[in-house]
């Protein structure tokens, strides 16, 4: 895997001006959207160096979202694995997942850009809820696109969004999951680009979204880096996070990329197993291609058609992955692995019983990986796992899985 | 000079306008598409645009989304579409361009694609999600095989982008009449759109206007503002509602009406 490490990652100068991470990323969209992306990029450059924006962001992050989130030493997981396991508690954020870090940043931007209407795509509904929450807080009109299949399996979050005043629009085309919701959000944006802000929920999409979302989510890794050093006196041996589009993963990983001794592991959704063809592991089972405005690893057939994905977790059920993660995979800086639905469920039960924390099914993938591979890692390692969200939204799916009717 | 370029040169001499018709290749199957192409030619179409179906057509409305789904279900692929055009070429010199999304062309390999497309007699290619900024290598490949790489412009395009496309585009410029997806309602303010006005002042490439042209009367109006008119969803919809047998005749007779409307000018 290390053989392709041909590119110097330090200093780290990615993306370039056109939004490329090596061969990945870029801006592959219909012409109608090009001016809007330029406008967004200019707005982002402006707020990036703006102290008043930073202050506003930090103030809401502290008092509204509840940051910094704790880095929790999970002593019973540690005992069970023979390592020192720390959980970055994004599940304790307002709305229940890391997604809100990004929506806070983007909605503050939308306000500065004087947009009145916000749209978003959502899979698990966490990004939809986070967007609806911020729109409620700031009095913006909000419409969330969600695949019919996800509306079914994440019905609690659909209800939350509606309570928050958002319109939830079901999408029945294709596989009726996250990718189709993103298609529909893009179609809406093409149609109403003048007055609408498109709030993408992960480190994917056309430039500048992957950059912007990474920056907003990096708060996770910045905090974790300080916290782990304070609690253990050194940097961790391993970082682990689940990877759907990659925003919680990159948010944790990014501030550690230059720390060469920290091993970084991204856990993709293995569904029924990579050999079954029913999974959502874009890097593990895909090849580079273009979808939703970016070049990145993509699950596709030999004709370049996107293939249907499967994961027990709606938030990971997506055929692509953010371009920066594709790049860091190719550069050999991040190792990508996958765990099956079954292994994720084992991780879910494990954390719930040992630590009294019910994780989101997405985050349960990272725990599933720890559970199955703990013995293979160097003894007594310091491991930081991103607990990206809590499991309340998944009670229906988990009950189904165990054959329980609620 | 490929057939698209020759066509516009001829039309210019006659002060005529081009009728560009769009259908999805392989909807409901490729044999029907080939027959439809002949019918469209006899109905008076000047340029044939064939949609290459994609699983995730982000810039298309429900009508073309559904037609793409039908085509994919029936097994259409870029390879088979190229082969079908090659066969069609034995009996027709109608200018043909393929319109689609980038990923199927990347999966094919874009160098191989332009080589095979040129050999099959395909004159142009329009890739919806490939703006000129990302298109340099692909544009060079298209150019070296004599295939026009056609770019889109939209009402949101500013002067800089209009200049860029006028410089880098080939064949013609496809002006999207509205901020929206295919099949939407045509903009009432087309004639006053700033981008279209600016675009008409450049003289490097012919301009075709499309998206939302549903009736011959609209087509006639649009033709006064451009060098050509693209009609898509209105024809594709007939294939859906009439089925194969009656669809052929229905499409041909509507195409005839469009042809008369567009060609009555000049
Ligand atoms: C709790 C949680 N974790 C992870 C994800 C996956 O997204 P990403 O890979 O962008 O973090 C989601 C998406 O919905 C989520 O809700």
Image (cartoon, coloured by chain):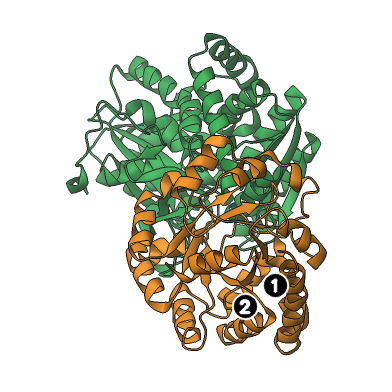
Chain colours: A green, B orange
Q: Residue furthest front?
A: B13
Q: Mark 2 lies on which chain?
A: B
Residue A375 located left or right of residue A217: left
Name the element at disc 2.
loop
Q: Nearer the viewer, residue A72 or A55?
A: A55
Whether residue B194 can be seen here: yes
Looking at the image, residue A346 lies above or below residue A299: above
Q: Mark 1 lies on which chain?
A: B
Q: Which of A145 and A347 is in front in this view?
A: A145
Residue at 48% x, 71% y: name it: B3
Picture coordinates of residue A404, whole percent (x, y): 67, 58
Residue B176 located left or right of residue A232: right
Residue at 57% x, 9% y: name it: A52
Q: Which of A16 and A381 is in front in this view?
A: A16
Circle 2 is placed at which residue position? Answer: B27
Give the mark nearer the N terminus: 1 vs 2: 2
Evaluate if marks 1 and 2 touch, with contact meaning CB atoms under 8 Å apart. yes
C-alpha distance separating marks 1 and 2: 9 Å
Looking at the image, residue A290 lies above or below residue A301: above
Tell me the tag on residue B236. Answer: 1
Picture coordinates of residue A5, whole percent (x, y): 20, 42
């Amino acid at each position: 895997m290390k053989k392709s490490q041909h590119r110097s990652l330090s200093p780290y100068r990615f993306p370039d001006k056109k939004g490329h991470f090596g061969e990945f990323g870029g801006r592959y969209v219909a012409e109608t959207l090009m001016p809007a992306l330029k406008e967004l990029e200019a707005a982002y450059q402006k707020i990036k160096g703006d102290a008043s924006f930073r202050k506003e962001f930090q103030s809401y992050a502290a008092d509204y979202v509840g940051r910094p989130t704790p880095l929790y030493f999970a002593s019973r997981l540690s005992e069970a694995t023979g390592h020192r396991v720390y959980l970055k508690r994004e599940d304790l954020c307002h709305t229940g997942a890391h997604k809100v870090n990004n929506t806070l940043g983007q909605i503050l931007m939308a306000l500065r850009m004087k947009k009145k209407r916000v749209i978003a795509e959502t899979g698990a509904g966490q990004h939809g809820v986070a967007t609806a929450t911020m729109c409620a807080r700031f009095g913006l009109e909000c419409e969330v696109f969600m695949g019919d299949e996800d509306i079914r399996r994440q019905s609690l979050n659909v209800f939350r969004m509606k309570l928050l005043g958002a319109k939830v629009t079901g999408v029945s085309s294709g596989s009726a999951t996250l990718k189709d919701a993103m298609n529909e959000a893009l179609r809406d944006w093409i149609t109403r680009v003048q007055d609408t802000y498109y709030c993408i929920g992960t480190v994917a999409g056309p430039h500048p979204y992957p950059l912007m979302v990474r920056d907003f989510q990096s708060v996770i890794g910045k905090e974790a880096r300080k916290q782990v050093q304070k609690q253990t006196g050194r940097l961790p041996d391993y970082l682990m996070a689940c990877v759907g589009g990659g925003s919680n993963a990159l948010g944790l990983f990014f501030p550690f990329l230059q720390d060469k001794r920290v091993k970084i592991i991204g856990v993709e959704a293995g569904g029924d197993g990579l050999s079954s063809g029913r999974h959502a592991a874009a890097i593990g089972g895909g090849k580079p291609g273009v979808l939703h405005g970016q070049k990145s690893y993509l699950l596709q057939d030999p004709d370049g058609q996107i293939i249907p994905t499967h994961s027990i977790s709606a938030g990971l059920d997506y055929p692509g992955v953010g371009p920066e993660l594709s790049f860091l995979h190719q550069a050999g800086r991040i190792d990508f692995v996958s765990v099956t639905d079954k292994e994720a469920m084992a991780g879910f039960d494990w954390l719930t019983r040992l630590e009294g924390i019910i994780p989101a099914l997405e985050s349960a993938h990272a725990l599933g990986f720890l559970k199955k591979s703990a013995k293979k890692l160097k003894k007594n390692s310091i491991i930081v796992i991103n607990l990206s969200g809590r499991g309340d939204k998944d009670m229906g799916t988990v009950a189904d899985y165990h054959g329980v009717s609620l | 000079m490929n057939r698209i370029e020759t066509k516009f040169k001829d039309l210019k001499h006659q002060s005529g306008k081009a009728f560009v018709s769009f259908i999805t290749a392989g909807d409901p199957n490729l044999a029907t598409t080939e027959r439809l192409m002949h019918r469209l030619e006899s109905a008076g179409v000047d340029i044939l645009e064939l949609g290459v179906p994609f699983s995730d057509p982000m810039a298309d409305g429900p009508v073309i989304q559904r037609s793409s789904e039908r085509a994919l279900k029936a097994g259409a692929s870029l390879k088979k579409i190229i082969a079908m055009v090659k066969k069609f070429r034995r009996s027709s010199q109608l200018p043909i361009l393929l319109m689609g999304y980038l990923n199927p062309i990347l999966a094919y390999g874009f160098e191989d694609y332009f080589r095979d497309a040129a050999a099959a007699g395909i004159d142009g290619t329009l890739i919806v999600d490939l703006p000129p900024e990302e298109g340099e290598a692909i544009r060079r490949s298209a150019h070296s095989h004599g295939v026009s790489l056609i770019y889109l412009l939209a009402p949101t395009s500013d002067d800089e982008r209009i200049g860029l496309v006028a410089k880098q585009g080939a064949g013609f410029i496809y002006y999207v009449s509205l901020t929206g997806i295919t099949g939407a309602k045509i903009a009432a303010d087309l004639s006053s759109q700033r981008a279209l006005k600016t675009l008409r002042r450049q003289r490097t490439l012919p301009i075709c206007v499309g998206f939302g042209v549903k009736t011959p009367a609209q087509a006639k109006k649009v033709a006064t503002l451009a060098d050509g008119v693209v009609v898509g969803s209105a024809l594709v919809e007939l294939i859906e509602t009439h089925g194969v047998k009656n669809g052929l005749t229905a499409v041909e007779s509507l195409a005839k009406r469009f042809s008369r409307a567009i060609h009555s000018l000049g």
